[in-house]
Amino acid sequence: MNKLVSNVKKTLVWNSSKIYTINYLVLLFSSFVYGIYILVLKLSKNINFESLLKSNPYTSIMFVVILLNLLVGYILWMNSNINKQHYDNKVFLLLGICQLLIGNIFSFITFISTFFVLKNSEGKIIKKNLTTLFLSTLLYLICFILLLRMVIK
């Protein structure tokens, strides 16, 4: 019985590697699901992709979010071999807030979980990814402002 309990504990323990992997998988999976939604929308309206983006601003914003999620997920995946203690956990808090603003609840939960798992790390932001992080955060905020403007009108 003790062996079974210890195996279950090992499986359920959230360490930095597991939660980090879940982060980029959720980003990539949500991009895939959003992409399928846009494809179904395109097929149901029987119009080409450009016309769909021009006719529906929400779909245009969602497409930008898909590309941003793919970019951030790719960067996280490419850096998955780096020791997670070298990350500044504030990066994950910032990305989590951006995901919440655009309505991606699952990514928000994984980013905030990563923030708390890496809470005691003394890492630094990797310099080559700082520009990409800044630009993606800026674009997430622009998408949020556009979504907010659509709701207010």
Image (spheres, helix red, strand yellow):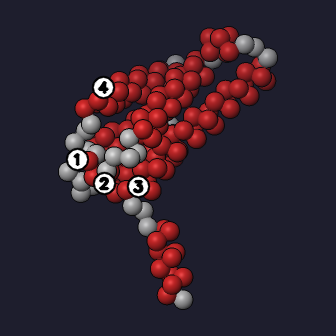
Mark 4 or mark 3, earlier in chain: 3
Q: Amino acid at mark 2?
A: Leu
Label 4 vs label 3, nearer the camera: 3
CB contact under 8 Å: marks 1 and 2:
yes
Q: Which residue is mark 2?
A: 118
Q: Which residue is mark 1?
A: 123
Q: Amino acid at mark 1?
A: Gly
> Could you classify mark 4 by the number of other residues whose Cα lies within 10 Å: few (under 14), some (14-19), or many (20 or more)?
few
Q: Position of residue 74 (x, y in %)?
A: 46, 35
The label number, if any, that marks residue 131 in the structure image: 4
Q: Amino acid at mark 3?
A: Ser
At horizontal 45% and vertical 41% (from top left) the residue drawn is 77
State how far apart marks 4 and 3 are (Cα): 24 Å
State how far apart marks 1 and 2 are (Cα): 9 Å
> Could you classify mark 2 by the number of other residues whose Cα lies within 10 Å: few (under 14), some (14-19), or many (20 or more)?
many
Q: Position of residue 40 (x, y in %)?
A: 74, 28
At horizontal 67% and vertical 26% (from top left) the residue drawn is 38
Residue 85 visible here: yes
| Left or right side of 97 for 9 | right
Mark 1 or mark 2, earlier in chain: 2
Mark 3 or mark 1, earlier in chain: 3
